[in-house]
């Protein structure tokens, strides 16, 4: 309930001020059993078994919307050596870059695996160009899990 | 996020009431899988019971200003899988979730074709440096590569294959770290520091679940014998 109030207040402030300077990402995940009680009531007001996920992302455009977009923001050409060249013109009206992933794998044989990753800005842009770099992110998360005593 | 649907509507109303002073996108998503029971203090009976899958999405995406009239770039996905059958409960994941969200220039780059040179050219008023990237792998492959999971929580391996794996693990004790690293490299894995070499090779053997994978490791062992 408190989290919901915070989210409402944040979004209200954003809406009223027309804030375009910050990207806001709010996520709540729940896996397993959750029982929520209200004061002086022994019966749970909410009982949840399984998976629940809620996301709110407020992503401003890079400019304040006053600039005109280029005619084509993404074009594909071929250079002299025959390689494909994709030219992405940085559109001032394009949204700020956000890349987020949530994964969960729950079974009875192995430990529960829950992973979350978030990148913004040029970090997100550069990362999404290269499969190998994405795999490196995955491997580094796997290593940290093992270092903390997580099983396989 | 107990009242997420109401929150989504409230957010949308706030943005509309603000006269679109806000320039950007709002994305909201709610998903629930399995059992969800709600009640109130006034009523002992449940006011809401969900068993199964429940999902709601709101995407408020502005359009680009210009002649294209195109919307800003957003990629979103959510895959949920479950194997609740008792016969497969020990060998398959009970719950498997894969959800993600990409926006803006990052989404444009994520959807760029395989092995292309991507040049992010700044606009006339932008101060950021030119960004030149080389895509490796197709767009679907790149998005799927982040944070992979084991395909299933338990894999049933044939007894004969398991015996061969045990035999390989037993050979590790007699090897020095240099030879262990040679085996790792011969099998196509990166070498690691000496103190971690034996554990790394043991992990690779444990991860081998197919005839081809075990054969590859056996061949690698032969290179140091």
Image: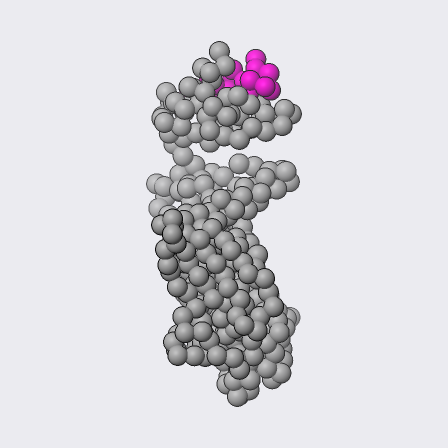
Visible residue check, residue B116: yes
Visible residue check, residue B11: no
Q: Residue at x 47, y 51 (%)?
A: B134
Say whether residue A30 is left or right of residue A80.
right
Q: Quadrant of the N terminus of chain B?
A: bottom right
Q: In the image, residue B195 lies at what x, y percent?
A: 65, 25
Q: In the image, residue A34 lies at what x, y percent?
A: 55, 59
Quarter-wise, where is residue B210 in the image?
top left
Looking at the picture, does residue B171 appear above or below residue A110?
Answer: above
Outermost top residue: B225
Q: In the image, residue A45 lies at what x, y percent?
A: 55, 68
Quarter-wise, where is residue B214 in the image?
top left
Q: Residue at x 63, y 24 (%)?
A: B194
**Which secondary structure class fits the magenta region best?**
helix
Say whether residue A96 is left or right of residue B93.
right
Looking at the picture, does residue B157 appear above or below residue A122?
Answer: above
Q: In the image, residue A150 lies at what x, y percent?
A: 59, 39
Quarter-wise, where is residue B56 in the image?
bottom left
**Mark count:** 0
Decide which of B34, A39 is in the foreground and name it: B34
Decide which of B1, B78 is in the foreground and name it: B78
Decide which of A109, A13 is in the foreground and name it: A13
Q: Residue at x 45, y 15 (%)?
A: B222
Q: Residue at x 55, y 84 (%)?
A: B21
Looking at the picture, does residue A67 appear above or below residue A120?
Answer: below
- Residue range of the region highlighted in magenta in the rendering: B163-180
Please name the colour scheme applied to the rendered image: one colour
Residue B146 located within the stretch drawn in magenta: no
């Amino acid at each position: 309930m408190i989290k919901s109030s915070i989210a409402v207040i944040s979004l209200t402030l954003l809406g009223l001020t027309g804030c375009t300077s910050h990207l806001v990402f709010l996520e709540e995940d729940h896996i397993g059993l959750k029982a929520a009680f209200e004061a002086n009531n022994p019966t749970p007001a909410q009982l949840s078994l399984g998976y629940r996920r809620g996301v709110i992302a407020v992503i401003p455009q890079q400019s304040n919307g006053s600039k005109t977009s280029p005619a084509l923001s993404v074009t594909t050409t071929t250079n002299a050596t025959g390689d494909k060249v994709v030219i992405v013109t940085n559109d001032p009206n394009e949204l700020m870059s956000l890349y987020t992933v949530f994964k969960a794998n729950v079974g009875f044989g192995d430990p529960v695996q829950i992973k979350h990753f978030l990148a913004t800005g040029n970090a997100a842009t550069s990362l999404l160009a290269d499969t190998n770099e994405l795999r490196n992110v995955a491997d580094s998360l796997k290593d940290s899990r093992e270092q903390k005593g997580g099983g396989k | 996020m107990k009242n997420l649907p109401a929150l989504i509507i409230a957010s949308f109303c706030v943005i509309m009431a603000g006269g679109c002073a806000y320039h950007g996108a709002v994305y909201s998503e709610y998903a629930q899988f399995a059992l969800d029971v709600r009640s109130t203090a006034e009523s002992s009976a449940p006011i809401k019971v969900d068993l199964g899958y429940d999902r709601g999405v709101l995407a408020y995406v502005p359009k680009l200003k210009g002649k294209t009239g195109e919307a800003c770039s957003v990629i979103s996905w959510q895959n949920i899988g479950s194997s609740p059958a008792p016969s497969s409960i020990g060998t398959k994941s009970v719950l498997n979730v894969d959800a993600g969200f990409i926006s803006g220039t990052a989404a444009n780059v994520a959807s760029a074709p395989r092995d292309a040179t991507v040049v992010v050219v700044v606009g006339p008023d932008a101060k950021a440096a030119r960004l030149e990237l080389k895509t490796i792998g197709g767009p679907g492959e790149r998005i799927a590569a982040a944070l992979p999971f084991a395909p299933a929580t338990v894999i049933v391996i044939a007894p004969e294959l398991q015996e061969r794996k045990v035999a390989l693990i037993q050979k590790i004790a007699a090897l020095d770290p240099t030879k262990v690293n040679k085996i790792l490299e011969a099998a196509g894995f990166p070498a690691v520091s000496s103190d971690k070499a034996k554990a790394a090779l043991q992990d690779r053997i444990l991860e081998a679940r197919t005839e081809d994978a075990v054969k590859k490791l056996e061949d690698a062992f032969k290179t140091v014998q």
